[in-house]
Amino acid sequence: MGFFYVDRIHEYEPGRFIRGIKNVTRNEPFFYWLPDGRRVLSPTVISEAAAQLASWLKMVGADFKKRPVLLADELTVYTGVAEPGDQIEMLVEIIDQDEDVVVTRSRACVRGKPVQISTCGRGYLLPMQDFDDPENPRRMFNRLYRPDLKDVKASVDLSEARGLKAIAGASTFESLRLVDGIVRHEPGRQVISYKNCASSEAYFRDHFPRKPVVPGVLMLSVVGETCQYLVKDEIDAPVRGRALIPTWVRNVRLRKFVEPGDQFVVKVDVKSGDATRHNSDLVVQAVATANGQRVMQAELGYRTMFATDIAHGHEWVAPAPPVEVAGEVNL
């Protein structure tokens, strides 16, 4: 996938318009720092996403026999920024075209507010076979085009979710980077988080080339990062006073694929244990959804440990696994 910035296409009409989204996630490239400490996506990447969406509109209209190559951009106005955790909604319209040139305008919005407006972009139409086997973009378009998900809502309201700030100079131990935002934060009790899945993320190249899906182990990693917020008193605190050390995981169930363009929502609840006590054993129940449907569930065991103990090299001994884990496993 690599250099693809359109994650999903919801609606299109050949020769007229196309609508799609680009998810912004913390672990992709092309960010820079604002003076106020915020980490935002380069506006040129937003322009590239809109240009790629325009390309899809023209390619599908030409039955993948031609593809546009950018000739000129008359004017693009930046009216806002996109941060990790945001979802960029894009609309591209064709305002003129002939056999060789297509002219488009576009608008990109975050949470309903424009962040970028392009008034006139020109593309030169060239034979598709000069760039790729026409069947490859056709297959990819069929994967991106998901009109069935146009009006599907997430399992929780993400409109007031808090995108996580990147912390300059944070140690590797503190640099959680899979979780993009927090919807609910009740230390010691419950955390609801989400991760945007973007086509530009490296793991999609190999998992799998013809059907990119999020690896199950990465989904479990998102769950693990979410659990760490159970022992953070403040979401954006640069240092945790306590850490959760994994001790076991059981009853993992993977129910559906998670694909580029999805928002992976994780809800974790503490079933037993005290997250405020040192060396307390916690049992956590996790449920993950995408597009309003359950895609994963798991039960996890942790032991609380103070960061000062870790820094001073105090020995930690994992507890015995639950009785159910120690016995035979029936496949």
Image (cartoon, grey):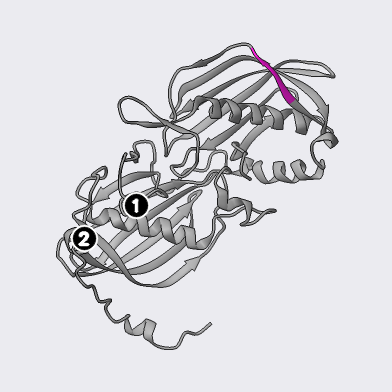
Q: Which residues are magenta?
A: 69-73
Other residues around mark 2 within 10 Å, as few (<14) / some (14–19) / many (≥20):
few
Q: Is residue 326 left or right of residue 207?
A: left
Question: Residue 242 at what x, y percent from top left?
Answer: 20, 58
Q: Can you see residue 304?
A: yes
Q: Can you see residue 13?
A: no
Q: Is residue 191 left or right of residue 78?
A: left
Amino acid type of the residue that numbered disc 2 sits on in the rendered structure: Ala
Other residues around mark 1 within 10 Å, as few (<14) / some (14–19) / many (≥20):
few
Question: Residue 92 at what x, y percent from top left?
Answer: 63, 24
Cα–Cα span, label 2 and label 1: 13 Å
Pointer 2 with pointer 1, Cβ within 8 A:
no
Question: Residue at 18% across / 65% down in the picture?
Answer: 274
Q: Which residue is mark 2?
A: 311
**N-term-proximal mark, 2 vs 1:** 1
Above or below for 284 versus 61:
below
Question: Residue 127 at what x, y percent from top left?
Answer: 85, 30
Q: Camera-side residue: 118 or 9?
A: 118
Question: Residue at 75% across / 41% down in the picture?
Answer: 137
